[in-house]
Image (cartoon, rainbow, N blue to C red):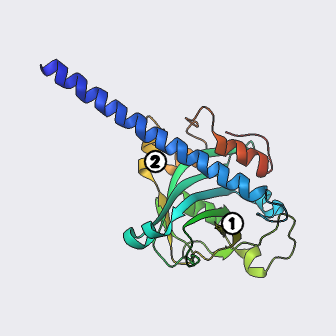
Amino acid sequence: MKYLATTLFVLTFTSGLHAAESEEIKRLTVSAEALTEIQETPDKGIPTGLFHKAQCVVVIPGMKKAGFILSGKYGRGFAYCRNPAGGWAGPAGMRIEGGGFGLQAGGSETDVVLLVMSPKGMQGLLKSKFTLGGEASVAAGPVGRDATAQTDATMRADILSWSRSRGVFGGLSLQGGTLRADEDANKALYSSKVTTQDILTGKTKNPVPSDEFAKALGIHGGTQKAN
């Protein structure tokens, strides 16, 4: 009887882990789809030149406004940073929380994209938690893949941000919000305990056999390589 109870516990625990992993892989795929749809929209999207210069990318897909209002959690997604070979190291689970993020009224779901443009911004991302606009400056990013007109604030910002709600894509203000590691997502994807820094600096191998997000970054981020 004791053996049976132990066996049932192990099977239930293992099933729970697989379900959690499946959920994170699904979110990873949705993140890839959001980024691809944005970049494949004619005359819209993130300027190619900026994307190619980005040191890290964060995508928070399909956030529901009601969840933000009721729970204070803005959303969950994933981050990648360039590895020394020019590919992408990740995925690292991320959460954005708190602050008035300028969501458009009535928007049911919002995709958020962040480009980390400076070493300071990258160091902030490697922390367990940091404040957007505090430890790293944030500016609304320009729209248009071939856009050349950029303000001084955009050129100096550590992080550039965009959002898409109901098909409308544009720059987004994220002042006062916090960005932190999503330990639940990382635990579900990686068999051993890892840190965000280990993941985003390439010390930990990508555990997802067919990572659609990494493939999308390879196409749109300026290299065909993906870690």
Locate residue 130, reporting x and y percent.
50, 67
Residue 185 numbered mark, or none: 2
* Position of residue 38 in the picture relative to residue 207 (left or right): right
Sort mark 2 into few (<14), some (14-19) or many (20+) by Cα contacts within 10 Å: many
Residue tagged by mark 1? Answer: 167
Left or right: where 204 falls relative to 19: right
Amino acid on which the number 1 mark rests in the picture: Gly
How far apart are the two marked residues, 2 and 1, measured between alpha carbons? 27 Å
Q: Which quarter of the figure has residue 39? A: bottom right
* Residue occupying the point 20% across, 24% down: 6
Secondary element type, mark 2: helix
Dot 1, crowdedness within 10 Å: few (<14), some or many (≥20)?
few
Residue 49 higher or lower than 8, as above or below: below
Quadrant of the image occupied by residue 69: bottom left
Quarter of the image for the C terminus: give it: top right
Residue at x 41% of width, y 38% of height? 19
Could you say where residue 181 lies in the image, as x and y percent from the top left?
A: 47, 56
Locate the N terminus and report the quarter of the image it occupies. Answer: top left
Q: Quadrant of residue 145?
A: bottom right
Residue 217: % across, % down: 72, 48
Q: Amino acid at mark 2?
A: Ala
Between 21 and 189, the residue placed more toward the observer is 21
Q: Residue at x 44, y 34 (%)?
A: 191
